[in-house]
Image: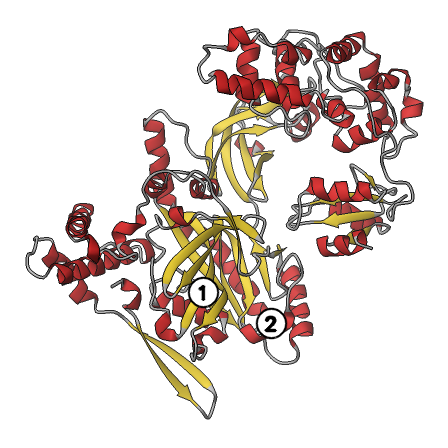
Amino acid sequence: MVFLGYYKTLFLVFDLSSFLCIMYTPIDEKRLFEQAKSLLIPKSGNEEEIIIQLREVINYADWKYYVNSSPVLSDAEYDNLFKQLKHFEEKFPELVTIDSPTQRVANGLSERFPTVAHLVPMLSLENTYNAEDLTDWDRKCHELGGEGLIEYCVEPKYDGASISIIYDNGNLSRGATRGDGVMGEDVTANIRQIKSIPLSARLMEDGISQVEIRGEIVIHKNVFEAYNKQRIAEGQSPLANPRNAASGTLRILDPTEVRKRGLSAILYHISDYTLAPGATRPPQLSTHYGSLQWLYSLGYPTPAKEMKVFTHIDEVIKYCSEFEARRDDLPFEVDGLVIKVNDFAMQDRMGMTTHHPRWAVAYKFKARQATSKLRRVEFQVGRVGTITPVAKIDPVHIGGVTVTSISLFNEDVVREKDVRIGDTVLVERAGDVIPYIVKPLTELRDGTEEEIKFPTNCPACNSELEKQPEEAAWRCINIACPVQVAERLIHFASKDAMDIRSLGDSNIRKFFDLGLIKDIPSIYTINWDNVRGMEGFGEKSIANLKQAIELSKKQTLNRVIFGLGIRHCGENTSKILASAVSNIKELYDWNVEKLSTLQDVGPKVATSVSDFFARSENRAIIDRLEEVGVNLINDHKDQQKAGGALEGKTFLFTGTLSQFKRSDAEKMVEEKGGTLLSGVSSKLNYLVVGEDAGSKLEKAKKLGTVNILSEQEFLVLING
């Protein structure tokens, strides 16, 4: 027996007005509370009846604590009841059921998370940011939905990790992450640890044999704060923010560790359901609002109390503004509101794109701001020697993240904003992600503030810094600068470059500090006798690493060029350079003028590439790579297929793609004879747009000459 039936539903149907009135009768909480207190004193007698009562009150206590946020038992009392239930179930194992509270805890570690298909694809939502966007969306809804009023249901957009859970015959059978929207990771064992998610439900009583429910895994603000304090006390680093903590926790292999994190859930959508033979659809499932109120009545954690229904977009806009002002009052982090067409039949008529449903939209709140004190500025050395000033501020909490460091980008930005050490600064998280300093609050200055002085020598190697007239950044040009060498090594071994698996950032830094590797070619001449005996390096680990290094010698020329870390030379430019030569050494003789003739290579890139290959120390590195057997030859010169369907056409991808990996999409373009560009320009023919597309999309729109494609439109073009 579980608490899911604690609400009874009464339906009053008025034929004259075809109006359905749903009323929910609350459970008998007084009886359950008294029953819980009574069970605190161990009982004897009918063990089966005692087990049923214990399950009932424990599920009731879980519901009050995790869904209603109003606990009725102390921790000690709860533990007492739970221990009793475990004792009886161990004594009478034949009485154990899959929906017992004791069955949430999984035994042992999961070896991996298999991939499973969602019953219905988990699409993204189109974003809006202001009243004009919402008004435009409303216009489209009326064009698609027909004449008459449209009801809109508004609910919080919780900032967590998306999940999809399935119940078969009333029992929780599977829980999965969003994944790529079509396939997700099966994390059922971890989902069962979340006490706000019922293990079973009386769905069959309403004729539902299977249902797929969407939701968000979240962490209560207080729980997150307390957990981080515990981690710090134990000498561990704190987790970054509630959203990342929730997402990361779902993928922990040990379910008992998942249980410790105190995750919660908010279920916000019924994506699919199957009726039992002979059953008729419950009347609640005709609207989104009714469906979530129905789930809530069964004990599911839904935003039922926060949901509002409106019949005019102006009412929605007003509510969005009011809600944003009180977003911090909620126990969980929210980054906006979701507006949905309430009627399911109308949702079906409006349909969806390959990216998002047309009947729903997200209203994103404005970027979060806070003030803090700028205490000092540190100067960091990047992979190609760029010196970046980083402001160190007093810790400030912005949108679920504690910010202590903020990039000031370069000297020009510092001078333009007139930021000084000791200033009170206004800090903002752009898009709730990247923090930056908006401005100093000059009216609060007291005269003790100090100007930020840029160094004349490298903080890492003390070499004199240089600054090109047309550039904003100071740079260290010493190729032997230890910080640059370490960063170049990490870049060279990275997944998108030489893909030397098992090496990784930490191992590279460790090997570099110990002198086992000094530069890029030395990766291929590591003295393995010096590695043996190091912590974490047994014979199997060494064998795997040696194999990965050996395999990297066969990587294509474009990966080698990209791995060398030439300034302004990204993956696409590296492919263009590789396709233009048969051997990397041919680039020694290419001057700026010749390089500028290549597609998508401008003067800045051409100058950087020419300077790199003109330096004797860089040529020496290439010679040593050749000596150890690294492939420096392009066996597929002019590899783009002549006469392909996309010959002469240029492409660029932006945003997050949901139907395929970007690398796979780029490969499709190249196989059809197309060319990839690295930026939006007059040379670009097609911009393929995924989720959260940014400045590239806006620039393409302004140009007016670029064909903007969705993923589905791109597939149609590719397939001819």
For this orientation, the residue located farthest to the left is: 44
Residue 169 or residue 394, whichever sits in front: 169
Check disc 1: other Cα within 10 Å, few if <14, some if 14-19, many if 20+.
Answer: many
Q: Where is residue 719 in the image (x, y as percent from the top left)?
A: 79, 54
Q: Position of residue 536 (x, y in %)?
A: 45, 18
**Structural distance between the alpha carbons of marks 1 and 2:** 18 Å
Secondary structure beneath label 1 = strand
Left or right: residue 602 versus residue 283 is right
Q: Position of residue 269 (x, y in %)?
A: 48, 63
- Rendered position, 634 above or below 55: above
Q: Can residue 449 be seen in this view?
A: no
Q: Which mark is residue 348?
A: 2
Left or right: residue 277 versus residue 555 is left
Kindly identify the residue that appears in the image at 66 percent across and 18 percent down: 488
Total number of numbered discs in the rendering:
2
Kindly identify the residue that appears in the image at 35 percent across and 24 percent down: 235
Q: Can residue 217 be seen in this view?
A: yes
Q: In which quarter of the image is residue 260?
A: top left
Quarter of the image that includes the C terminus: bottom right
- Rendered position, 563 above or below 371: above
Q: Name which residue type carries label 2.
A: Asp
Left or right: residue 498 versus residue 568 is left
Q: Where is residue 263 in the image (x, y as percent from the top left)?
A: 37, 46
Mark before the other along the chain sequence, 1 or 2: 1
- Rendered position, 504 above or below 89: above
Q: Name the residue under label 1.
A: 211
Mark 1 or 2, which is nearer the eye?
1
Q: Which mark is residue 646?
A: none
The answer to whether mark 1 and mark 2 are in CB contact below 8 A is: no
